[in-house]
């Protein structure tokens, strides 16, 4: 059984076998590119690629999925204390603490761009073609625009700003960041892969960043409501229009700043 070396994939590879009362397979660590080469030449039978593009390439070539995280969460033991909870983790932006703390406005704007991209892709599926050359070059795949779209939708879905509440507000949900990350941390502590005493908020900054964006959005909504009852000068109206544009782009930080200037 060929698997990626990443520690974060360990639970996905091992927990289902333990729940079924089966001995673990004989694992061989290999990176995705090497797995794909061996798969194309029929030199392996079972593999767990870490990257979604490789998985989609194999699915389109007729490979059969044995299990995935969605199936495990649907049919396995449920609840935040489930042994399957450590399998719930999400891809996102990564940074050092020093950079986050010294470039807070940059992080907020960068995150806004991410949500703007997600919204644009939902409106125009042809935009997936923009990513095709790059993705194929780094993953060794030969996906077209539709293949990239299927990769995202089936294996690694983009989650819009409006849907982020399941990660940061629904504390009883399996996808709530503290539940999923907390379970993964606990599992890695038990296996000795990381030291004890680490909390989800020690290694994740997504929650405060999301909440700051929500706060700027809420304050901007209030300013837009205030502006509705005012006759603004031409320059102020232009500033307010610009605020609406940034708001529609999910850049709530600059929308708030511009709206504040427009109504002051």
Image (cartoon, grey):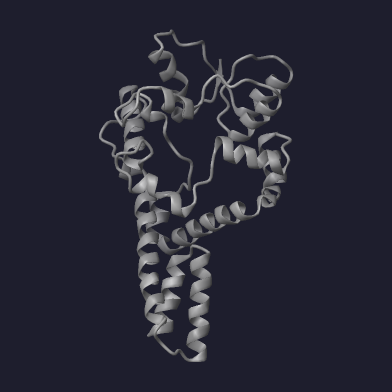
Q: Position of residue 11 (x, y in %)?
A: 42, 24
Nearest to the observer: residue 153 or residue 107: 153
State whether residue 240 is above or below residue 119. Answer: below
The N terminus lies in quadrant: top right
Give the vertical position of 209 relative to 224 (above or below). above
User: Residue drawn at (69%, 28%), measured in percent from left and top?
Assistant: 60
Image quarter (top left, top right, bottom left or bottom right) of the C terminus: bottom left
Q: Looking at this rendering, what residue extends furthest in the left direction? A: 197
135 left or right of 111 in image: right
Indicate left or right for 90 with 38 as reference.
left
Q: Position of residue 175 (x, y in %)?
A: 38, 38
Query: Closer to the camera, 255 or 71?
Result: 71
Q: Is residue 148 shown left or right of residue 80?
A: right
Q: Position of residue 252 (x, y in %)?
A: 44, 66
Q: Residue furthest front?
A: 229
Give the residue at x 45% y 58%: 107
Residue shown at 28%/39% (left/top)? Answer: 199
Q: Position of residue 42 (x, y in %)?
A: 71, 15
- Which quarter of the picture shows residue 16? top left
Residue in the image at 34% along x and 38% along y: 173
Number of numbered tags placed on the structure image: 0
Instruction: Name the one closer to the observer, 3 or 163.
Output: 163
Q: Is residue 228 above or below residue 204?
A: below
């Amino acid at each position: 059984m060929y698997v990626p070396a990443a520690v974060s994939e360990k639970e996905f590879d091992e927990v289902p076998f333990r729940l079924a009362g089966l001995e673990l397979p004989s694992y061989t660590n290999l990176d995705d590119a090497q797995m794909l080469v061996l798969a194309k030449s029929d030199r392996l039978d079972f593999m767990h690629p870490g990257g979604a593009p490789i998985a989609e390439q194999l699915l389109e070539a007729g490979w059969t999925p044995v299990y995935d995280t969605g199936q495990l969460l649907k049919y396995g033991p449920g609840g935040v204390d489930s042994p399957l909870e450590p399998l719930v983790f999400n891809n996102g932006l990564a940074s050092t603490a020093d950079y986050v703390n010294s470039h807070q406005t940059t992080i907020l704007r960068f995150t806004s761009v991410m949500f703007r991209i997600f919204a644009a892709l939902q409106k125009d599926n042809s935009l997936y073609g923009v990513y095709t050359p790059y993705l194929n070059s780094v993953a060794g795949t030969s996906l077209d625009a539709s293949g990239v779209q299927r990769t995202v939708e089936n294996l690694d879905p983009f989650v819009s700003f409006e849907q982020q509440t399941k990660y940061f507000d629904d504390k009883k949900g399996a996808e709530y960041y503290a539940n999923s990350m907390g379970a993964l941390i606990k599992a890695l502590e038990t296996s000795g892969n990381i030291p004890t005493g680490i909390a989800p908020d020690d290694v994740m900054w997504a929650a405060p960043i999301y909440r700051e964006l929500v706060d700027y959005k809420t304050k901007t909504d209030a300013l837009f409501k205030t502006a509705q009852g005012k006759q603004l000068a031409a320059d102020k109206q232009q500033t307010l229009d610009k605020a609406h544009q940034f708001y529609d782009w999910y850049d709530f930080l600059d929308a708030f700043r511009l709206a504040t200037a427009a109504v002051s």
